[in-house]
Image (tube, rainbow, N blue to C red):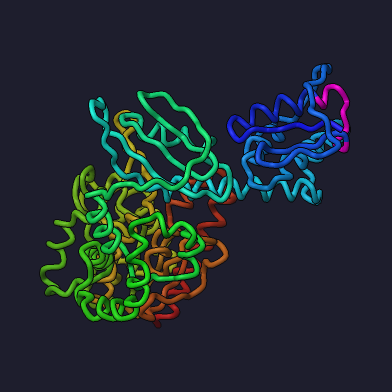
Amino acid sequence: MHHVVIPEINSAAIWRDKARAFLGAGTPPDHILWGETTIAPDLFATPAHSPQGGPVSVPRSFISLAEKVVWHSDPERFARLYSFLWRLRDAPHLMSDRGDADLARLRQMEKNVRRCQHKMKAFVRFREIRFERANRRSFAAWFEPTHNTVEPTADFFARRFADMDWRILTPKTSAIFEGGTLTFTQGQPKPDLPEDASEALWITYFRNIFNPARLKPRAMQSEMPKKYWKNMPEADAIPELIATAPARAREMARAAPTLPPRHMAGAQAQLASCASAWDGPSSALSSAITACTRCPLHRNATQTVLGEGPVDADLMIVGEQPGDMEDLHGTPFIGPAGQLFDRLAQAAALDRRAAYVTNAVKHFKFKPQGRRRIHQRPNSSEINHCKWWLEAELAQVRPKLILALGATAAQALTGNGAALMSRRGTVEKTPTGQPVLITLHPSYILRQTDPKASAAAETLLVQDLKAAMAMLA
């Protein structure tokens, strides 16, 4: 039986070397008695010498696991690690076996060590100590970790407080950082540390960030266990803060502002800008639309293209947006699509002059290509911004029927521009209840390259125009 003593300082490196040597020599776990310097040696065990063995291969994931578990407070940690390592020789896949009881125990120990390290980073409280002729400020802290986490966590403090000397004293291992050099010594009894003038300021800060309305004592004690409170100056204020939390929360509710916060006011203003709120006189509507800058389309368009027709028309015809010719002349539906619509309207006995004709979007959206301006379909944001004016036109004209030409018009009027072909020829409603007959846009017909498809689309549009006339008869 081999008796291996692992000291409290540098435990990880020493255990790793010993375990690698025993594994290379083929020494089974039941031939090794692992212990700490604080544990009395076994009566029948003999001191172990590092055996000579061949090279061994250890999964990298196990190395990461062992580097945490060796700092656990369980006296059986070294034996548990070596026993599992012995099993890994023939079954490396065990590192991914979630059902293995030994691995589950080691993973829990690893988690406990990581949690203890986190608590150490959060709850160590330094107090300034003064040394004569010292070149740097010096600080000391007393901490009582659950596990042996001083050594693996000391690098964190060395990086964060590299410009000062400090020492973290614990019952088992103490870390000392002086002149930029980190060393470890045996544990010490709790020292009599001096008062720190900054603690009063820190407690004041802690009191002010304590939110009584979000108090959850169990959750707080889970993150800040009571065992650490005695070494934390702010902990003296916790019982009072908990006891007075309900009254403070009620006072906060009574003192809450009645006006919305600034960011909410901004959000409400933005929401209001997207709603239709035109309430001016009818005579001023055209001028208001012409001066519109609600979306970026006004920057490149030649002019705003207004609707035209009788303001008491029974039929309102809504297209997509102005085209190149409409943008240049300021009149809707005079380009190729408008000319095709006039021809098909004549075939359906629809008098365009008796209808109010407009577009869902009032400015021409295009992409320059040489000397040409290529039509671009308006996006949802542009459609929504221009709904302000379309709804104002609907309120002014009050048509008995609205004819929506194409997906953009359907989206502006009903909120849905999808599946146009399946909806064509049907009557839907605007949010205010006005009937909308969905049909094709003449530009869809012009885009057809197959003469038969073009003729079929013309037939469908004529049918819908006739249906519109029949509804108004």
**Which sits in the foreground, 251 or 337?**
251
Image vertical order of residue 134 relative to residue 240, above or below: above
- Residue at 35% over, 44% down: 126
Q: Is residue 326 visible?
A: no
Image vertical order of residue 192 relative to residue 311, above or below: above
Q: Position of residue 258 (x, y in %)?
A: 20, 77
In the image: residue 175, left or right of residue 43: left
Q: Is residue 410 visible?
A: yes
Q: Position of residue 26 (x, y in %)?
A: 88, 26
What's drawn in magenta, residue-wise?
22-30
**Which sits in the foreground, 203 or 211?**
203
**Which sits in the foreground, 469 or 223?**
223
Image vertical order of residue 271 relative to residue 398, above or below: above
Image vertical order of residue 73 relative to residue 28, above or below: below
In the image: residue 417, left or right of residue 166: right
Q: Position of residue 248 (x, y in %)?
A: 28, 77
Q: Is residue 414 magenta?
A: no
- Residue at 58% over, 47% down: 147
**Residue extending furthest toward the front:** 43
Q: Position of residue 383 (x, y in %)?
A: 34, 58
- Residue at 71% over, 24% down: 17
Look at the magenta stretch and give its main secondary structure: helix
